[in-house]
C-alpha cells in the first residue's frame, strides 16, 4: 500500500512534466513531424495510476496540446499543410485508441476481480456444504457402529443365556 501511494504521488507530476515537454518540443518542430504519437506514451504512463480516469484525462489534455501545437507551431514551406494535419490527426487517433484500450483493460480487470471473488465465494460455500455432508456421514457411521456393537452385545448376551439354559 505504501508503494502504491508513492507511485501515485509521482505519476501525475510525471505526466504533467512529460506532456509539457512534448508540447514545448511540438512548438519547435515543424507541423509535418509526427510528434503527437509520443503523447500515447504519456497516456500509457497515466494508466499505471490507481485513478482509472487519469488516462482519459491525459488523452483529453494531449488532444488540446496537440491541436494547440499544430495551430501555433512552425510550418515549413516544403511540407504541405495537409501532411501536417494528417500527422496531427493520426497522433490524436493513436492517443485516443491507447486511452480507450487502457480503459477497456481496466474494466476487464474489474470484471476479472469480481469473477474471482464470486468463484472464491462459491468454492467456500461448496466446501462448507461438503464439510457438513461429511460430518453428517461421520455421525451416521458412528451411529451404525454403536448399533452394531449393541447388536453384537445383545447377540452375545442371548447366546450366553441360551447356554445357561441348556
Image (cartoon, helix red, strand yellow):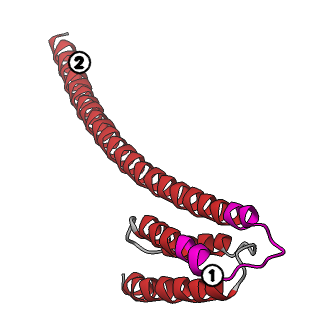
Residue most extreme to the top: 166
- Report the disc number at residue 73: 1
Q: Residue at x 33, y 38 (%)?
A: 126
Q: Position of residue 135 (x, y in %)?
A: 26, 38
- Classify 10 Å Cα crowding around label 1: few (below 14), some (14-19), many (20 and above): some
Quarter of the image holding residue 95? bottom right
The residue lying toward the viewer, choosing from 116 and 12, is 12
- Quadrant where the C terminus is found in the figure: top left
* Rendered position, 91 above or below 45: above
Q: Residue at x 50, y 87 (%)?
A: 14
Q: Is residue 98 left or right of residue 49?
A: right
- Report the disc number at residue 155: 2
Q: Position of residue 9 (x, y in %)?
A: 39, 88
In magenta segment, residue 10 = no
- Classify 10 Å Cα crowding around label 2: few (below 14), some (14-19), many (20 and above): few
* Rendered position, 38 above or below 156: below
The residue lying toward the viewer, choosing from 121 and 111, is 111
Q: Is residue 25 left or right of residue 159?
A: right
Quarter of the image holding residue 157? top left
Q: Is residue 97 left or right of residue 104?
A: right
Q: Position of residue 37 (x, y in %)?
A: 67, 70
Quarter of the image holding residue 89? bottom right
Q: Residue at x 58, y 80 (%)?
A: 72
Instruction: State the separation of the CA atoms marked 1 and 2.
Output: 107 Å
Q: Earlier in the sequence, mark 1 or mark 2?
A: 1
The residue lying toward the viewer, choosing from 123 and 86, is 86
The stretch in magenta equals 66-86
Tell me the SS state at disc 1: loop
Q: Main secondary structure of the magenta part?
A: helix
Amino acid at each position: 500500500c505504501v508503494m502504491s501511494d508513492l507511485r501515485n504521488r509521482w505519476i501525475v507530476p510525471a505526466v504533467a512534466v512529460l506532456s509539457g515537454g512534448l508540447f514545448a518540443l511540438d512548438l519547435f518542430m515543424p507541423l509535418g513531424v509526427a510528434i503527437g504519437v509520443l503523447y500515447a506514451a504519456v497516456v500509457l504512463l497515466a494508466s499505471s495510476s490507481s485513478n482509472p480516469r487519469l488516462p482519459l484525462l491525459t488523452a483529453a489534455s494531449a488532444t488540446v496540446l496537440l491541436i494547440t501545437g499544430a495551430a501555433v507551431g512552425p510550418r515549413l514551406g516544403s511540407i504541405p499543410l495537409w501532411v501536417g494535419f494528417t500527422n496531427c490527426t493520426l497522433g490524436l487517433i493513436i492517443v485516443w485508441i491507447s486511452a480507450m484500450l487502457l480503459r477497456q483493460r481496466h474494466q476487464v480487470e474489474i470484471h476479472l476481480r469480481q469473477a474471482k471473488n464470486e468463484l472464491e465465494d462459491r468454492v467456500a460455500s461448496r466446501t462448507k456444504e461438503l464439510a457438513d455432508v461429511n460430518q453428517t456421514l461421520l455421525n451416521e457411521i458412528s451411529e451404525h457402529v454403536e448399533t452394531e456393537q449393541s447388536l453384537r452385545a445383545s447377540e452375545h448376551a442371548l447366546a450366553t443365556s441360551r447356554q445357561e439354559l441348556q
